[in-house]
């Protein structure tokens, strides 16, 4: 047996879903804590998961309300069917899993048991888009496209911990089903620096600018705000319109801001360029004959690589630096 000391095992950020940068303010498990707070006021709230309580922050709810928590095991179809049954009996179920498993594996059960019946099941899913480096098996790059076509389904893509905490009571109050993408763990706090609060179905203009309008959802709003600051240093005015509700869109806000002449319009999303926020906005603008120069920052129509998230975000054009470079190039065309 070799007497040489074992080398320390190298780790990779492929498994880490947190997007917080060094020194950035964060809040731990905002979804779990917001649900616990709301459940103290509403005895009808129950939580269910498919063996992923720890990885969707539902373990916080399970610790506070163990008699209202259901561990369904690795059976996403059963998870959604049980949530539908509880909703039929007057409960308000929050069902959590990974976004790939809800959108791909359990879609038919969500469609037939929840959406068709317009039941108030709240489906809250971790690892949306490119928030894991585990590759196509875990990267839900097409989840919004899948659920956008489902009648009765509301879709929410919050930006940060502030957005998530604000979204929980709002989606609970909504009478129909909701699919919400989730950032988990230590989630960055950004939007408390702006005059902002989450309102279901509403977009918010976080900053204004004369040269480019960035319409964004999810953590790409964080990136859009950082890109706007970088562009400002070069004398480029960038507005950021945060659209956390993807279905239904805040059509009035988008049309108002995109209709202001002379600005490049860029949609930024942590999702495939096929079927997500970008195509929803483009369709809206076309239907209303609003025709700015239009570009998309999003993931390609491809199965993405595995690896470290910062590397992947740069490679696929959704990092702050990559988005800033793209916008400068488009403005110069």
Image (cartoon, rainbow, N blue to C red):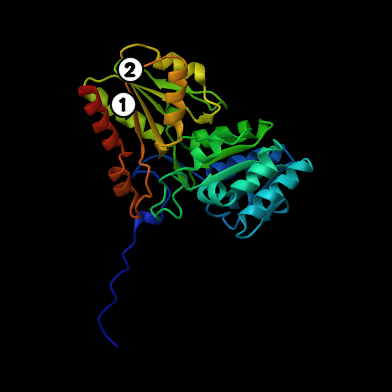
Residue 93: x and y, percent? 68, 44
Determine the residue located farthest toward the top in the rendered image. Answer: 261
One can see residue 63 in this view: no
| Residue position marked by numbered label 1 in the rendering | 228
Q: Secondary structure at mark 1?
A: helix
Q: Are marks 2 and 1 in contact (CB under 8 Å)?
A: yes
Sequence-wise, which precedes: disc 2 or disc 1?
2
Specify the quadrant that holds the C terminus.
top left
Q: How far separated are the C-alphas under marks 2 and 1?
A: 9 Å
Residue 328: mark in rendering: none
Report the side of 158 relative to 40 (left or right).
left
One can see residue 28 in this view: yes
Q: Residues within 10 Å of mark 1 (few under 14, many from 20)?
A: many
Q: Secondary structure at mark 2?
A: loop
Residue 328: x and y, percent? 23, 27
| Residue position marked by numbered label 2 in the rendering | 209
Q: Residues within 10 Å of mark 2 (few under 14, many from 20)?
A: some
Of residues 211 and 152, the one drawn nearer to the viewer in this rendering: 152
- The correct choice, above or below, for 234 with respect to 81 in the image is above
Report the side of 225 relative to 85 (left or right).
left
């Amino acid at each position: 047996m070799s007497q040489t000391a074992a080398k320390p095992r190298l780790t990779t950020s492929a498994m880490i879903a947190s997007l917080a940068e060094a020194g950035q303010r964060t809040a731990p498990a905002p979804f779990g804590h917001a649900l616990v707070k709301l459940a103290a006021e509403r005895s009808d709230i129950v939580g269910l998961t498919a063996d992923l309580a720890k990885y969707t922050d539902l373990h916080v709810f399970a610790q506070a309300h163990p008699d209202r928590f259901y561990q369904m095991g690795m059976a996403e179809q059963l998870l959604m069917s049980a949530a539908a049954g509880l909703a039929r009996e007057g409960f308000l179920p929050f069902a959590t899993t990974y976004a790939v498993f809800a959108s791909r594996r359990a879609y038919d059960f969500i469609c037939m048991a929840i959406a068709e019946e317009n039941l108030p099941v709240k489906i809250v899913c971790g690892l949306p888009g490119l928030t894991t480096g585990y590759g196509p098996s875990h990267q839900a790059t097409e989840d919004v496209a899948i659920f956008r076509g489902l009648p009765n389904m509301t879709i929410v893509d919050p930006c940060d911990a502030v957005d998530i905490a604000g979204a929980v009571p709002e989606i609970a109050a909504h009478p129909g089903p909701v699919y919400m993408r989730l950032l988990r763990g230590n989630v960055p706090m950004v939007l408390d620096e702006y005059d902002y609060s989450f309102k279901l179905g509403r977009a918010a203009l976080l900053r204004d600018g004369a040269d480019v309008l960035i319409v964004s959802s999810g953590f790409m709003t964080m990136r859009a705000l950082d890109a706007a600051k970088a562009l400002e240093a070069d004398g480029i005015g960038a507005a950021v319109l945060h659209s956390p509700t993807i279905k239904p869109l805040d059509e009035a806000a988008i049309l108002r801001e995109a209709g202001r002449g002379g600005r490049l319009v860029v949609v930024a999303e942590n999702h495939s360029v096929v079927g997500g926020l970008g195509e929803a906005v483009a369709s809206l603008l076309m239907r209303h004959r609003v025709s700015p120069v239009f570009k998309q920052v999003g993931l390609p129509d491809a199965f993405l690589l595995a690896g470290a998230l910062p590397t992947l975000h740069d490679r696929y054009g959704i990092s702050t630096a990559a988005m800033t470079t793209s916008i400068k190039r488009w403005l110069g065309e």
